[in-house]
Image (tube, grey):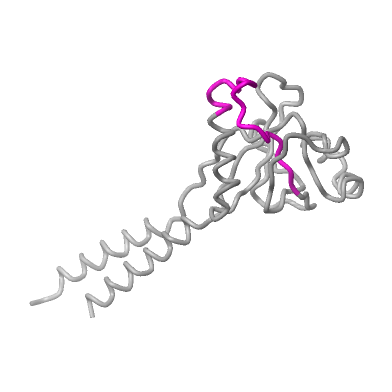
Amino acid sequence: MFRATILGCLTIGLLSASAALAAPIQFVVAELPDNRVHGDSFIVTIDSADSSNLQHARELVDWIHNGADPLLSPGATIVVGSVTAGADGINRDWGAAGMPAWSWHVEEPISFADFTVEILDGWPTFVESDVPGWIANTNGKIGFWNYTIVDERLVPEPATGCLLSVGLFALIRLRRREPA
């Protein structure tokens, strides 16, 4: 019985860990460092199975962290996506005090471009000022010219591993207390 309980706990822990690894990965999108005007940012998610976009997003982060020299750009710096009205609990202005949530969010999947049509250019605060108007005017698309992925946001791992450890510790303690 004890071994079956341990095996069950370990199986649940491994399944939870694999689910956490398959979760979408969040990135901060903000203005290019040499052209900050609005000082706002937003969050996009990329599915961990989307290896091409994930790799490009990480190349952009490296480029930004290494000085964002235009001559060394990995290209396709503009994030293109579909905007949906409503907060999703993820999309916020991570650069602002208190990290306020936006009343809109970007749906997956996103793509990258070197340029977009002018109507898609804007900034997060501008979208926030009239979300229904932005969606109506752009068919719900964004492609802000002066914004790119600047950082990968590390999302805390679910507490499953911690709970598994506590449960396993408790089971071992109980097992030691059983009479022989």
Q: Position of residue 77 (x, y in %)?
A: 68, 34
Q: Of residues 25 and 56, which is closer to you in this image?
A: 56
Q: Position of residue 117 (x, y in %)?
A: 85, 38
- Identify the image quadrant of residue 159: bottom left
- Magenta part of the protein: which range? 63-81
Tell me how many marks there are: 0
Q: Position of residue 175 (x, y in %)?
A: 18, 71
Where 164 sits versus 149, above or below? below
- For image coordinates 77% across by 53% down, the residue present is 86
Is 55 situated left or right of 84 in this image?
A: left
Where, quadrant-wise, is the C terminus in this rendering?
Answer: bottom left
- For image coordinates 71% across by 26% down, the residue present is 39
Farthest residue to the bottom: give it. Answer: 1
- For image coordinates 91% across by 49% down, the residue present is 136
Where, quadrant-wise, is the N terminus in this rendering?
Answer: bottom left
Inspect the magenta stretch and tell me whether residue 74 lies in it: yes
Inspect the magenta stretch and tell me whether residue 16 lies in it: no
